[in-house]
Image: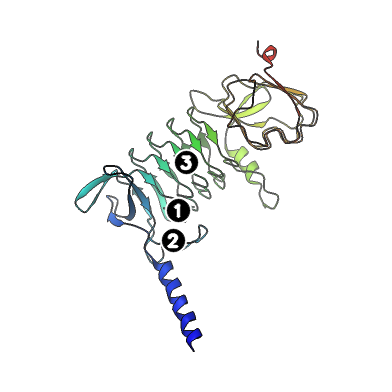
C-alpha cells in the first residue's frame, strides 16, 4: 500500500512540475494579446527581459508549452518597454520557444530593444506571413523560423552577425525574397532548405524555384542590395569544370559544390570567412587553392570531407 501511495505521490509531483509557470509576469500589449515575460537580473543594475512562454518546458520537443493559456494570434506588436512592480524595463530578447506553434499569428513587429531571437522562437508558426526584424538584433538562433511556410519575404538587418542551424528550414513554400546581411559572420548548418530523401516534394527544389539567386562564375549566390554575392549557396550545375568565386563573397554554404566530380580547381579568396559542412563533398578531381595561409576558424571541420588537395598561401591565383 505504501508503495502505491508513493507512486501516486510521485505522479502528482510530476504533474505539478509540468504545470509550473515559466514566466515572471504577464501583460497585455497594444494589439490586445497577452504576452509572458521572464526577468533575470545579471548584475545590480543590469537585467534582461525576454518575451517567453507560460509553462516550464521540460522537453524542447513538447508542443504544449502554452498549456491552458491562449496562444497569441493575429497581428502582434511586441512592446519595447514593459512595467513590472512599478518599474519600467526594456524588452531585450525573444526567448527560445516563445511563440512555438502559434499557428494563428499573421504578422509580428519586434521592437528595436531586442538583441536576439533565440532557438525555435517562431518555429511552427505556419500562418505567419510577415515579420519585422529591427536593426538591434544581432543573432538568430537555431530553428528560429523553421516551419514558417507562409512567410513571403524576410529581410534580415545588417546588425545580424550569426544565423543558427536550420533557421529557415520549412520556409520554402511562399518565400520569394530573402536578404542575407553583409554583417554576417557565421551561418549554421542547413540554414536554408535542404534535399530530403523522403520528401514527397523536394524542399530544396521548391526553394530554388521561388527564390531568385544571383549567378556569377558558375555559382548561385544570395545576398542583399549592397552585396548580391554575399553567400555562395550552390554550384550552377554538378557538371561544371571551373568556378570563379566572386570577390565580394564571404561565405560558402553547406554542400555548395557537392557532387561536382568534373571540377578540377577552385581558388578561395581571403574574403571567405565561413565554409559550411561538406562544401566540397565528392569533388574527386579537385585541387583547392586558398589565398589564406591557414584554415579560418569559422570553416567547418568537414568543409573538405574527401581530403581534396589544398594549396595554402596560393597568392599566384589571385593576381
Q: Residue furthest top?
A: 319
- The image shows residue 178, relative to residue 273, as above or below, that is below
Residue that appears at 66% across and 49% down:
201
- The image shows residue 173, relative to residue 183, as above or below, that is below
Callout 1: SS: loop
Which residue bears the numbered disc 1? Answer: 97
Q: Earlier in the sequence, mark 3 or mark 1?
A: 1
Q: Residue furthest left?
A: 86
- Tell me where residue 315 appears, x and y as whole percent: 67, 13
Q: Are marks 1 and 2 in contact (CB under 8 Å)?
A: yes
Q: Nearer the viewer, residue 250 or 145?
A: 250
In this rendering, position of residue 166 left or right of residue 157:
right
- For the C terminus, the quadrant is top right
Callout 3: SS: strand
Which residue bears the numbered disc 3? Answer: 140
- Tell me where residue 95 appears, x and y as whole percent: 41, 49
Callout 2: SS: loop
Q: Earlier in the sequence, mark 2 or mark 3?
A: 2
In this rendering, position of residue 10 left or right of residue 29:
right
- Tell me where residue 280 appears, x and y as whole percent: 71, 32
Residue that appears at 33% across and 53% down:
37
Q: Quadrant of residue 255?
A: top right
Q: How is the image coloured?
A: rainbow
Q: Residues within 10 Å of mark 2 (few under 14, many from 20)?
A: many
Q: Residues within 10 Å of mark 1 (few under 14, many from 20)?
A: many
- The image shows residue 212, relative to residue 88, as above or below, that is above
Which residue bears the numbered disc 2? Answer: 65
C-alpha separation, residue under disc 2 versus residue under disc 3: 21 Å
Q: Nearer the viewer, residue 53 or 132?
A: 53
Q: Nearer the viewer, residue 245 or 45?
A: 45
In this rendering, position of residue 144 left or right of residue 281:
left
Q: Residues within 10 Å of mark 3 (few under 14, many from 20)?
A: many
Amino acid at each position: 500500500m505504501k508503495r502505491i501511495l508513493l507512486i501516486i505521490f510521485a505522479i502528482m509531483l510530476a504533474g505539478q512540475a509540468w504545470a509550473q509557470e515559466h514566466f515572471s509576469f504577464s501583460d497585455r500589449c497594444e494589439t490586445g494579446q497577452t504576452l509572458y515575460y521572464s526577468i533575470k537580473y545579471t548584475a545590480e543594475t543590469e537585467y534582461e527581459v525576454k518575451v517567453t512562454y507560460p509553462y516550464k518546458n521540460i522537453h524542447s520537443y513538447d508542443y504544449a508549452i502554452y498549456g491552458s493559456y491562449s496562444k497569441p494570434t493575429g497581428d502582434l506588436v511586441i512592446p519595447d518597454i514593459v512595467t513590472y512592480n512599478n518599474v519600467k524595463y526594456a524588452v531585450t530578447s525573444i526567448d527560445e520557444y516563445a511563440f512555438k506553434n502559434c499557428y494563428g499569428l499573421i504578422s509580428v513587429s519586434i521592437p528595436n530593444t531586442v538583441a536576439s531571437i533565440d532557438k525555435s522562437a517562431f518555429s511552427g508558426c505556419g500562418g505567419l506571413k510577415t515579420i519585422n526584424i529591427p536593426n538591434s538584433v544581432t543573432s538568430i538562433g537555431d530553428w528560429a523560423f523553421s516551419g514558417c511556410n507562409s512567410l513571403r519575404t524576410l529581410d534580415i538587418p545588417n546588425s545580424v552577425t550569426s544565423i543558427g542551424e536550420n533557421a529557415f528550414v520549412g520556409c520554402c513554400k511562399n518565400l520569394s525574397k530573402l536578404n542575407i546581411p553583409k554583417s554576417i559572420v557565421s551561418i549554421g548548418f542547413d540554414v536554408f532548405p535542404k534535399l530530403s530523401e523522403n520528401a514527397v516534394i523536394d524542399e530544396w527544389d521548391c526553394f530554388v524555384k521561388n527564390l531568385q539567386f544571383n549567378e556569377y562564375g558558375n555559382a548561385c549566390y544570395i545576398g542583399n542590395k549592397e552585396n548580391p554575392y554575399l553567400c555562395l549557396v550552390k554550384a550552377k550545375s554538378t557538371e561544371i569544370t571551373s568556378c570563379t568565386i566572386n570577390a565580394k563573397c564571404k561565405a560558402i554554404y553547406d554542400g555548395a559544390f557537392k557532387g561536382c566530380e568534373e571540377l578540377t580547381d577552385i581558388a578561395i579568396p581571403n574574403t571567405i570567412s565561413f565554409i559550411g559542412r561538406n562544401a566540397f563533398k565528392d569533388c574527386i578531381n579537385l585541387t583547392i587553392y586558398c589565398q589564406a595561409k591557414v584554415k579560418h576558424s569559422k570553416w567547418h571541420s568537414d568543409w573538405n570531407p574527401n581530403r581534396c588537395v589544398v594549396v595554402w598561401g596560393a597568392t599566384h591565383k589571385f593576381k
